[in-house]
Amino acid sequence: MTRWTVSMSTVVLALLFVRSAAAQRLVTGAGFGIGTGLQRSDILEDRLVQRARTRLMAKFDFRNDEDMSQGIGVVALFEVEPKVSLGVEVRYIRWLGKAVSVFAGVPAILAPKTLVGVDVGVDVSIPLGKSGIALFVEPSLAAMPFGSDLPGDHVLLWGLLAAGVHAQF
């Protein structure tokens, strides 16, 4: 009986007097932007480049407060011109400071036709005060070698520039 009493007393005292450990916290961000650029493909014989698709983007990023220098991003893509299509991109993001990050991702246009590839880029943020809201400018390069929307089964190369608003939560 004494062993049981000592054990229970120890457990009760531990629960009453031990502070909880600080847990990891998920830091999130979200943004909205618009972008376009230039595209190149081997099938374009009469022109070196042509204008790339115009797209709206909704960006979401997630990182751990214990390692704020890296995280994961998800971007919803809505191409609005010259044709309407929907897609998504998953990114690995590396922050080089508060205002600059680099990323590598896998973009995929899913409907009505498909395109899948890889991209790399830089995201530069211009803070608007201390509210956590910033303007962003995002140049990127993409190669789209797979999908049913390729012109003549040739790789599409995109040089894109996007701009918009981003908020950190």
Image: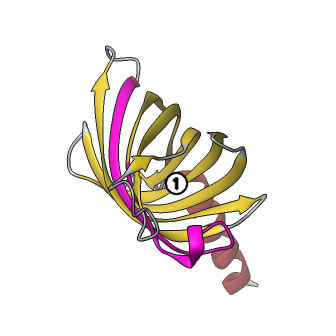
The reply, left or right, for residue 21 in relation to residue 112 is: left
Within the image, what quadrant is residue 110 found in?
Answer: bottom right
How would you classify the magenta stretch by its main secondary structure? Answer: strand
Write the residue at 57% across / 78% down. Answer: 153
Vertical relation: 95 (above or below) 28? below
Query: Where's the N terminus, which quadrant?
Result: bottom right
Residue 93 lies, in percent from the top left, at 37, 58
Q: Nearer the viewer, residue 126 or 88?
A: 88
Residue 162 lies, in percent from the top left, at 41, 37
Q: Residue furthest front?
A: 46
The reply, left or right, for residue 101 in relation to residue 82 is: left
Q: Nearer the viewer, residue 58 or 13?
A: 58
Vertical relation: 154 (above or below) 83? below
Secondary structure beneath dot 1 equals loop
The reply, left or right, for residue 6 in relation to residue 166 is: right
- Whether 39 is among the magenta residues is no
Residue 77 lies, in percent from the top left, at 62, 47
What is the span of residues highlighted in magenta in the rendered image? Answer: 134-159
Within the image, what quadrant is residue 51 found in?
Answer: top left
Write the residue at 56% across / 59% down. Answer: 89
Whether residue 104 is visible here, answered yes or no, is no
Residue 124 lies, in percent from the top left, at 27, 37
The reply, left or right, for residue 129 in relation to residue 145 is: left
Q: How many marks?
A: 1
Write the residue at 52% across / 54% down. Answer: 20
Q: Nearer the viewer, residue 161 or 128?
A: 161
Whether residue 77 is visible here, answered yes or no, is yes
- Whether 148 is among the magenta residues is yes
